[in-house]
Image (tube, rainbow, N blue to C red):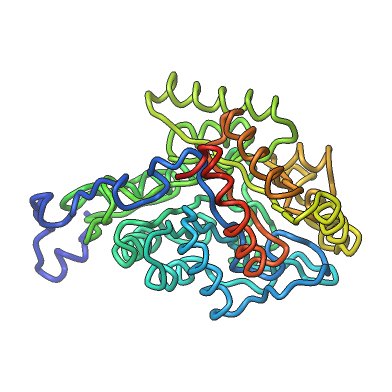
Amino acid sequence: MTVTANERLGLNPTDPRPVEETRPLVDRTQTNPLFGDQKMKLGLFGSNCSHGLIMSHAPSTYEVTWAHTKEIAQRADRLGFDVLVPVARWKGFGGSTNFNGNCFETYAWAAGLAEATERIAIGATSHLPTVHPIVAAKAATTIDHISGGRFALNLVMGWVPPEMEMFGREQREHDARYDFGQEWLDFATRLWTEEGSFSIDSEFFTGDLLEAYPKPHQAPRPALLNAGNSPRGIEFSARNVDINFASLDTLENIKSYTDALRAKAREDYQREIKAMTYGLVVCRDTEEEAKRAFQQVVDEGDWGAAGNVIKIAGSGESQSFDHAVREMQERFIAGWGGYPIVGTPEQVTEELGRLHEAGMEGMIFGLIDYNEELKYFGERVMPLLKEAGLRH
């Protein structure tokens, strides 16, 4: 017979407690902009790691220091952006830039920015095999309280074998990673939502007298994000998360994807899900200037790092990126395989409008020079988005 730690110490299991004593039950639409009424939500992506979303030596003042990343976050907050989503990276991709090799850990990064900002949602990106659900659930709850209910957790199954090897783990087969991810999330969700203690005995996790207090500030849990675009990834997103991120090559494919994603969630799981895209935005006074800046990123690209990413993505390790690898390799150099928007403020506004019409409810994006170009975006693009009815 197994003797629990509580029994060894002569302690009683936690008794169920009234919900009102442990959970604020805050309406997420009142605290988290990801659930707000902006027609086209906007976010910054990758402002916690070296080179952001560009694998290039193109000139930029962007640097990975706390002062700089905080300044970017606070500027985005003042401009009314909806979310900050970081990249989780444990090992750079080599090449002449060692792309993304200099990277702030995202839970700690999110906690700091939660205190430094007022309105914007703050994300952490978590490679699920690298952190136990008990630790992650507690960290997420803590950040949610620091932020007053603005936290979002981006769930990643772990797709880079050299990173998994750093943790002494072998990379699981693609679908098996989602099996693990589902159990991981089920475990974390119970910690966020259940009163009293519970037990788990599953393929990947076991434990007795499990509990976590306090509960998250948001009810029933923090916002959940995922960028799985393979059939299994779409299944996971449709079943579990609030927002799925996807990068596709044409507006027609985007429309087909978003329609299928929402139908999957509604028909199979009786729930709603939002879709957002990601990519690089290059906005200048003239179309020629914007195209020239984009081309400079490509011309000065770190093809060694890009080759390493493409090798992993194209090998079947990550099915989510296969389409981008095949169709446009330069998108990895200029935007991490995302959807590029290049042009004048008017053209950027029009393209964001077309993305919305195709079913995307927002875009998280990188910039060649985050802080400087964010100022320009606020001055020139945000007013046009309001005029177009995409923002208010």
Residue 281 in the image: above or below residue 94:
above
Q: Position of residue 74 (x, y in %)?
A: 48, 69
* Location of residue 357 (image quadrant): top right
Horizontal and vertical percent position of residue 10: 9, 68
Residue drawn 43% across the image and 37% down it: 240
Q: Position of residue 195 (x, y in %)?
A: 17, 50
Residue appearing at x 65%, y 30% in the figure: 254
Give the camera-side residue of 180 and 344: 344
Residue in front for this viewpoint, 135 or 167: 135
Quadrant for the C terminus, please: top left
User: Residue 79: percent from the left, percent from the top?
Assistant: 49, 60
| Residue closer to the observer: 239 or 293 | 293
Relative to 216, say whether 220 is above or below. above
The foreground one among 236 and 28 is 28
Q: Answer left or right for 166 relative to 180.
A: right
Query: Which quadrant of the structure image shows residue 285?
Result: bottom right
The quadrant of the picture occupied by the N terminus is: bottom left
Q: Does residue 240 appear left or right of residue 330 in this picture?
A: left
- Residue at 56% over, 44% down: 385
Q: Is residue 185 left or right of residue 316?
A: left
**From this viewpoint, which residue is outermost toward the top?**
267
Q: How many marks?
A: 0
